[in-house]
Amino acid sequence: MTEDDFWTLVAASGTRPGDRQAREDWLGRRLLELPADAVAAFQARLEAAVDTAYTWPLWDAAARIEDGWCSDDGFVSFRLWLVARGRTVYEAAVADPDTLAGLSELRALAGRRIEDWGDEEWPEWERLDRIAREVWNRTTGRDGEDFDAFYDAVDAVDAADLGTGDAARARDPEGGEPSGRRGEPLPRLAALFPRSDGLD
């Protein structure tokens, strides 16, 4: 699976009609059409993209959107959601997280209490990280709990095809410090999402 193939597939899944479950089902069906090594390659590319987005400025952006708090796990889910927005949005946000202020789905959350956001509205997509593993297990006839075999296949693809050899870091958000500097200004996001505690 080439990088272009990955981005085409993940962007299509993120923009399918229906709720997240419908999009997950669609992506699962597309991955089931692929051989097991391509499914592992999809996961390797997903983890590489999530890892590249492991930056302090993006974490600050996620915390700003989520009213001052974004846990380690929440930031992983946020980055998965970001990847699903497609390559153009993803690359712009990695370069300048304040560009997220232009997304209509985030603008729709602005001015609303975080407690009133629906499950489908949250800028997080945790299950995106599980779909390829579930498909790979079905494709290879493995037990659904056989995580090691799947991640061995993903790491083999990562080392051989992507040249990073570091997919495991995306599975462990505390495996190292995020890149970049904390506290970069995010004026557009700050205007959309003023902190409820008034500490802007």
Image (cartoon, rainbow, N blue to C red):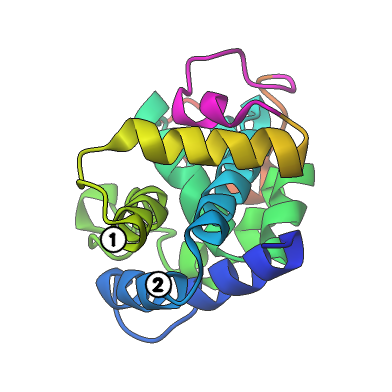
- Quadrant housing the N terminus: bottom right
On the picture, is 175 further left or further right than 123? Answer: right
Q: Residue at x 62, y 57 (%)?
A: 101
Residue 138: which numbered mark, if any?
A: 1
- Quadrant housing the C terminus: top right
Q: Position of residue 2 (x, y in %)?
A: 73, 62
Residue 165: which numbered mark, if any?
A: none
> Which of the 4 quarters of the picture holds residue 12?
bottom right
Cα distance, mark 2 to mark 1? 8 Å
Local crowd at mark 2 within 10 Å, few (<14), some, or many (≥20)?
some
Task: Report if residue 95 is visible in the image.
Answer: yes
Instruction: Identify the amino acid type marked 2.
Output: Leu
Q: Position of residue 16 (x, y in %)?
A: 44, 83
Residue range (magenta): 165-181
Instruction: Identify the amino acid type marked 1.
Output: Arg
Q: Is residue 121 above or below residue 71?
A: below
Q: Position of residue 102 (x, y in %)?
A: 65, 64
Q: For the residues labelled 2 and 1, say whether their Cβ atoms are less than 8 Å apart.
A: yes
Q: Residue at x 48, y 71 (%)?
A: 14
Local crowd at mark 1 within 10 Å, few (<14), some, or many (≥20)?
some
> Which of the 4 quarters of the picture holds residue 141?
bottom left
Q: Which residue is mark 2?
A: 32
Task: Report if residue 63 is visible in the image.
Answer: no
